[in-house]
Structure formats: C-alpha cells, structure tokens
Image (cartoon, helix red, strand yellow):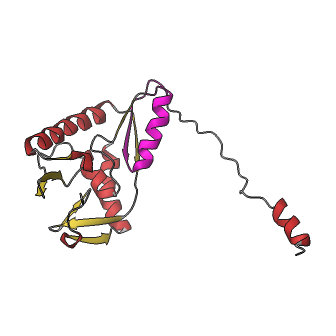
Amino acid sequence: RNYGKRATTLTNMDRQTAGHISPSAWKISYQDHILLLGSCFSDSMAEKMAACYLPHTTNPYGTLYNPLSIAQAMDTQTDEEWIVSDKGLYHSLLRHGSFSGTDEREVRRAVAESRKKMAEAIEKATVIIITFGTAWVYEYEGRVVANCHKLPASAFTRRRLTVSEIVAIWKPILERY
C-alpha cells in the first residue's frame, strides 16, 4: 500500500497542545505541613512528597473517593462510628478497607487512632490538598458509605451526588479552613 502524504502528515503531527502556565506566586515549602485527603491520586502525590522529604500526612482514614465521605472524614468532632459485621469480619463503613478485621475491639481501636491522627493533621496543616475520585456514592440504610467492603451489592443503592450537594457539603468546610 502507498500511504503517501497522509502517512507523512501523521508522522509530523503535534501530539500535544502547547501551552504555557506561569509559575504560581504561592509555593509549598519545607515549613508547611501538608494534609492530603481523598482518592488514590492523593496517595501518589504523597509518595512524591515523601521522596522530597516534605512534611505531610496522607489519608488517615484510608483512601476515600467521594466528596461526602471526604467531608465526613474532616469532621473529627463526631463520636459516631459505623461498624457492621459480615461473614466474621467487622468493617467501618466510614473508612477504607484497611479498617476491617475479625476483632471488633481492634477495628474500633484503629478507628479511634485514625480519628486522633486526622485531628492532629488538620490542626497542624498549613496546606490541605483534596482529590475527589467520583461523584458516585453508595448508600447503606439510607446513608452514604466510604467503602462497600464487599458486602452484598443488594444492600446498597448507587446514586450520583449533584453539583449542588457537593457545593453545599464543601462550602462550610472551605469557609472554616
């Protein structure tokens, strides 16, 4: 086959959009303490920060993906915890799967420790970076969970948060911090 001029055009084609972003006047420094919350992208950024020895705390409640669960994680004043049992395991529905175990007291201890770590991180943070993963949430007994923990899918209702809901959740948090 003769691809002729078309092959040449594709070979010489730009594969990216050129642009220039001016450096920000605001910089993160070694005097800052950074709190990263949210999706696995927060975990990836934390690895880069650790490699540069930047002081940071990452996801004390584990990786969380939806805006409501991340907002709930920032509310360290609540004493409420939501532990469920399934097939011999105890799970915190407000935290990552790493907060599951066979001993309910141990799960509750880990949850309490994570709440303390979150409160300390928020207190000393000079920079908070939040990465939302998705607006899709799962509800169990009418409440949004952070993780389904492989419980039966029939126990959950899936829905998408609206922009208005996300703004209503986050506006007071952003005003507070």
Horizontal arrangement in the rendering, residue 89 relative to residue 11 (left or right):
left
x then y, percent, for residue 9: 86, 66
Residue at coordinates 30% horizontally, 65% vertically from top-left?
137
User: Among all residues in the image, which is located at the extreme left?
Assistant: 105
Query: Picture coordinates of residue 19 (x, y %)?
Result: 71, 52
Residue 39 magenta-highlighted: yes
Left or right of 134 on screen, residue 107: left
* Horizontal side, residue 51 vs residue 142: left or right: right
- Quarter of the image where the N terminus is located: bottom right
Viewer-nearest residue: 154 or 176: 154
| Residue 142, picture quadrant | bottom left
- Residue 173 in percent (x, y) is at 30, 49
The quarter holding residue 116 reads top left
Q: Residue at x 32, y 51 (%)?
A: 64
**Towards the viewer: 24 or 148:** 148
At a point 90% along the width and 74% down the height, the residue shown is 2
How many circles with numbers are drawn on the protein? 0
Q: Is residue 88 above or below residue 159?
A: above
| Residue in the image at 22% along x and 66% along y | 139
Q: Split into 4 quadrants, where in the image is the C terminus?
A: top left
Magenta region: 29-54
Residue at the bottom extreme? 1
